[in-house]
Image (cartoon, rainbow, N blue to C red):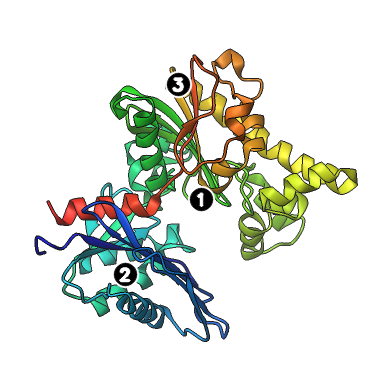
Amino acid sequence: MTATATRVLVLNSGSSSLKYQLLDMHDGARLAAGLVERIGEETSRLAHTPLATGGDTRETEGPIADHTTALKAVAAELAADGLGLDSPQLAAIGHRVVHGGLKFTEPTVIDDAVLTEIERLVPVAPLHNPANITGIRTARALRPDLPQVAVFDTAFHTTMPEYAARYAIDVATADAHRIRRYGFHGTSHAYVSRKTAALLGKDPSEVNVIVLHLGNGASASAVAGGRCVDTSMGLTPLEGLVMGTRSGDIDPAVTFHLKRVAGMSEDEVDELLNKKSGLIGLCGDNDMREIRRRIDAGGEDGARAQLAFDIYIHRLKKYLGAYTAVLGRVDAVAFTAGVGENAAPVRAAAIAGLEQMGMAVDADRNAVRSDEPRLISPEGSRVAVAVVPTDEELEIAQQTYALVSA
């Protein structure tokens, strides 16, 4: 890597999508960003925004057969802005990898052995790791000379003590099949917990934070002095909070009941719990804005939306209480991600009634919309309640650059 190589391309590969950002780590500037979606379909779409020049988003539609074709199309868009993948200023490519198991506890330069280990984890992340692997292989083929770094969603949670990470099942069976709680959204929880400490003017080692990452996927974490000690997602991203399409916590016997009584197959149960449950299963919508609109409209439809909202909030309160007990002392609660950053009614409802725990929300502060980290608790509150926009791409870029420039 040359001294002038300060750019990092961040890739987040989904099963039929490729999300990307190009950042300059000299000053943290975003140079370009975009998304390729519906890869493998006739109506694929690429939306590219040249942030460095402030230009308008360029959109193209047409068949994009695979991730290799998608990344080549992205490279062409970047080259059109003078930011091509062949630039000597490109230091590395950072890849979001959902599951790193227990082996990968920090960002890792990818070689054949690392890629093989990521492949071994496919059985515990069948919806995510295969797409991540495809993105890695594609990028390595296009720039075999360039460092490729894997940043793992699970890494931040590997500091959980065994009593938090273990399920209460037969130890030999659990170990044989790598069954334990891994947690996800780790790059977001790491970034937000640090930003929350900075908002309070303290070092992360001095602060205990409950982070609520609330998007279509949702998770909570208890972070003590900068280290995760518990998190809501488990072996897979299905456990924990009520989500857009996922059930979150559920009696495991429900799955047996559905197979025995309803005659559902394993795949049908999987589909139900991951894609047809949560908010969409409860009321037919997984967009919190639409749910709030229906509640405000009233009537029978509004009542159904209200019940879904109440179930969602009830689960949030349970985790706030549980993680207060786990941490012993809570200095801050941080809301982040799409719902956490934008849905003031969710924040207000989640904290309402928790005054005895030192938590409260100021209505005026909560109503403010901003892209900056901010406090929404009343002045002098024992527990700071904050809205802290997450930035997983920046976190991946920073970890990637720190590794390759060391």
Q: Amino acid at mark 2?
A: Ile
Q: Earlier in the sequence, mark 2 or mark 1?
A: 2
- Return the disc, 3 or 2, that comes first in the chain's sequence: 2
Res. 182 visible in picture: no
Q: Amino acid at mark 3?
A: Val
The Cα–Cα distance between marks 3 and 2, rounded to whole angstroms, is 39 Å
Mark nearest the camera among 3 and 1 is 3
Question: Which label lies toward us, 2 or 1?
Answer: 2
Q: Residue at x 84, y 45 (%)?
A: 297
Where residue 288 appears, x then y in whole percent? 67, 48
Indicate the quadrant where residue 292 lies.
top right
**Callout 3 touching callout 2 (CB < 8 Å):** no
Corner quadrant of residue 372: top left
The N terminus appears in which quarter of the rendering? bottom left
Q: Is residue 314 visible?
A: yes
Dot 2: element: helix
Viewer-closest of 312 and 168: 312
Residue position for label 2: 136
Q: Could you say which disc has been placed on residue 166 in the image?
A: none
| SS at circle 3 | loop
Residue 267 lies, in percent from the top left, at 62, 65
Query: Where is 333 relative to 383, above or below?
Result: below
Q: Nearer the viewer, residue 300 or 265?
A: 300
Callout 2: few (<14), some (14-19), or many (20+) C-alpha neighbours within 10 Å? many
Q: Which residue is mark 1?
A: 237
Q: What amino acid does circle 1 point to?
A: Pro
CB atoms of marks 3 and 1 within 8 Å: no
Q: Which residue is mark 3?
A: 330
User: Who's the residue at 31% across and 22% down the image?
Assistant: 206
Query: CA gap, disc 3 to disc 1?
Result: 25 Å
From the viewer's perspective, tell me whether residue 321 is left or right of residue 198. Answer: right
Between 123 and 333, the one lying in front of the other is 333
